[in-house]
Amino acid sequence: MAEGYSLVKTVVQVLNDGGKGFTDLGEKLKNPESKAFFLHEATHRGAFAKELEAELALAAGDTKDIAGTVGGAIHRTWGDLKASLGGSDHTLLETAEQGEDAAKKAYKEALEATDLPSTKIRQLLVTQQAHIQASHDKVKALRDSTAS
């Protein structure tokens, strides 16, 4: 269970990072549709993280040390810097797509594990992964729509 547990913790960390990133970038976006999508998506990430944390606690009795990742904090700082330097919506959406790529990778790796803590966790990952993919596609479409 050690590797599977660790991979699920990574997914939770990426979700926490994503929630913060979606909120931060959503507040900086100028387009009202993009802003609303990002703020709504931030709520989804928080809910997904809580679902997985609850199941990890049931399966393994431990959810300590689950927070955001150092990479996520750096990524958000980069997004803040781009915004403070007058980053366009396109630039901010590029940053968001990079974050979505990290989320897709974390889900893929977790679902490839053969030793996940429970079947319920696997079911949650499969369901959430579909949403993450759809969100990635939406971010990419928004980014493409803002290209000069």
Image: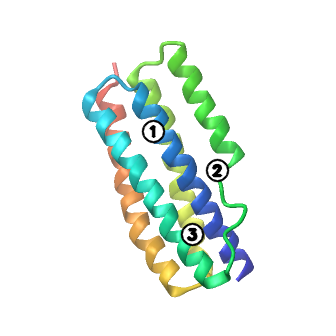
Measure the C-alpha gap from mark 1 to mark 3: 21 Å
- Quadrant including the C terminus: top left
CB contact under 8 Å: marks 1 and 3: no
Q: Is residue 60 above or below residue 83?
A: below
Residue 87 shows up from this direction = yes
- Amino acid of disc 3: Glu
- Identify the coloring: rainbow
Q: Is residue 147 above or below residue 5?
A: above
Residue 113, quarter of picture:
bottom right
Residue at image location 54% in from the left, 73% down from the top: 54
Q: Is residue 148 left or right of residue 81?
A: left
N-term-proximal mark, 1 vs 3: 1
- Amino acid of disc 1: Thr
Residue at image location 71% in from the left, 66% down from the top: 64
Q: Secondary structure at mark 3?
A: helix
Residue indicated by mark 3: 53
Measure the C-alpha gap from mark 2 to mark 1: 14 Å
Count of numbered circles on the image: 3
Residue 146, quarter of picture:
top left
Q: Secondary structure at mark 1?
A: helix
Residue sitting nearer the eye, 53 or 140: 53
Measure the C-alpha gap from mark 2 to mark 3: 13 Å
